[in-house]
Image: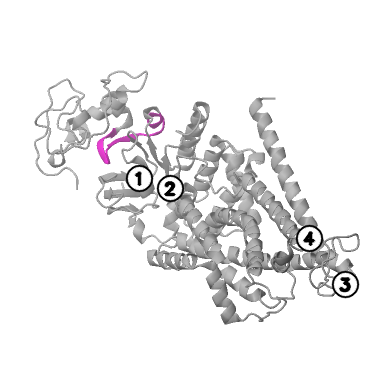
Amino acid sequence: MTVALRTRLDRGRRRGASLWWGTGVLSAVVLLCVLAPLLSPHGPNEIVAVPFSAPSAEYPFGTDALGRDVFVRVWVGGRLDLVIAAIVVGVSLAVGTVVGIVSGATPRRWLDALLMRFVDALVAFPFVILVLALIVVVGRTRSFWFLPPGAPAIVIASLLVNWSIYARLARAETMSLRGSDHVAAGRMLGYPQSRIVGRHLLPGVVRITASYAVADVVIVVIATASLAFLGTGVQAPTAEWGSIMYEGRAVLGTSWWITTFPGLVLAVTGLAVTLIADALLKVER
Amino acid sequence: MTAILEARAVTKRFGVDGPPAVDGLDLAVAPGAGVGIVGESGSGKSTLARMLAGVLPPTSGEIAVGGRPWTAVDRRDQLRRRVQMIFQDPYGALNPWLSARDAVAEVIRFWDRPTRAEARERASQLLADMGLTADAMGRRPRGLSGGQCQRVGIARALACAPDVLIADEPTSALDVSVQAQILNLLVALREERGLAIVLISHDLAVVRHLTEDAAVMYAGRIVERAPTHEMFRSPAHPYTRLLVGSIPGMSGGEARTAHDPGVADHPCRFAPRCPRRADDCIAVRSHDPHLPGGRWAECVHPHLPAAAPVQRTQTQHGGRT
């Protein structure tokens, strides 16, 4: 076996390994988010024991300042974090890709300029101030459908800023594909613009934006948790990784488990998603 | 003889005030004709090819297909099918997300609207005619060799049932052994389907193999036109002579070190490199390029087949319209 072939196989095996580890760990986190609260005899806001009990067999992550089970709160909170991330990333991916491809493929220069200046304006706007402004507008206690108070403002604010990154990525990729011979061939074969965009540009553009979307899940989860940690996110008593950590920060020295466990789960989830994103991006090249 | 594809005084400029890539060029392609266009890199060959195929609009001048300018041909117009092109980069010309069969079937479905199964059937047949194995038809460009990709590109062009096939350096990205296969395929297509072909190449041997008429391009202009065999036998333009002389195994040319194409103030673009440059070779554009013996070259001091001293015609009006 040649050296080149062997390194290629090794690289393939490593890539496979990181993909398996990533999906394995992420599935475990999702599974726990879904199942742990169902299997637990009590709810996330129920006072079950003495406040600040250290981790034990009955309460693996200990209890918080009110005597609630941190283990249950972490997994119930995870549901919210992952749902917010899924909504924000999903909508951003769809909207950003469409706007970017339109901007990059349109023969009308003014339309491209208009869309991109709009994106520039959004990106230039400070994110935290935008969230604060939205919370004033939407209301701290406004809930929407299954989203608890505070969450709708986060979703709207994240979406407003987030889709623009996809739009820029999609536009750049569209511009580069547009000059390629297979798009020229499409024009030569008489295909209408809609078919060229849909069949000859979109698959390549989605490849780029979808790869980014996987990595973006981590960014959105961390942003959501950070906002709660700053006190502007999901409102108490709703459990969410950032809000649990926020509540535990004052007693970090004595009751370390309240902040440490949600932080650990957040970090592990982020790592798993990054591993997946990494493996997927390598497959593309 | 009515030309099926005709370029009239076509100019293409990239950027606002760059030198023109193609400069006031005329070319006519008759049905079933084989026209070779030769020139070195940067002479504007590929730009011309794209304009002829209607994918690049000229800055000025007009390209007409079946008598109608490209600008008046709608995308869905049946005229659109009649001129097709095969590209220099066989991979890049194919949609990377479609299999060979799907790429060809897409064209058939688009133009002829048969059922999905029938389109697939016809695509498979066409690809098989081009020498692609059934196994390769299901693969995407990434899984195909350069030669296979070029066969797919040719099949896709033929799926339109064109009258003219423009081949822009169809073999320059391929291995030598595969080059011959693709060229033989093009020869067979001309014989079987009566296709006119515009072959664009820097490789004189390829042009000689496939065409009856040849034109030599230099810095965006055609500097010599002649029947292919005659051009090779006795090149009239000093630049043609230089090109012919640079083929290994060909004799009769004057080998000379090539400099960068100097587009100086000199009216003749080739003058800075020309071994025959003289003080009076000015104003080529007002000079009649028709030479005795039915030859055509934009040169004041051409090489003529007869050993006689240069008899240049003294007409002062422009030779081109």
Marks 1 and 2, Cα distance to the nearest angstrom? 21 Å
The residue where tag 2 is placed is B163
Q: Mark 4 and mark 3, same subunit? A: yes
- Name the amino acid type tagged 4: Trp
Marks 1 and 3, Cα distance to the nearest angstrom? 78 Å
The residue where tag 4 is placed is A257
Residue B47's tag is 1
Classed neighbour count for the residue bearing mark 2: other residues with Cα under 10 Å, few (<14), some (14–19), many (≥20):
many
Q: Is residue A194 visible?
A: no
Determine whether B182 is above or below A155 in the image.
above
Q: What is the span of residues highlighted in magenta in the rendered image? A: B206-226
Q: Residue at x 40, y 52 (%)?
A: B55
Q: Mark 2 and mark 3, same subunit? A: no
Q: Mark 1 and mark 4, same subunit? A: no
Determine whether B272 is above or below A104 in the image.
above
Label 2: element kind: loop
Marks 4 and 3, Cα distance to the nearest angstrom? 16 Å
Image coordinates of residue A204 in percent, x first then y, are: 56, 53
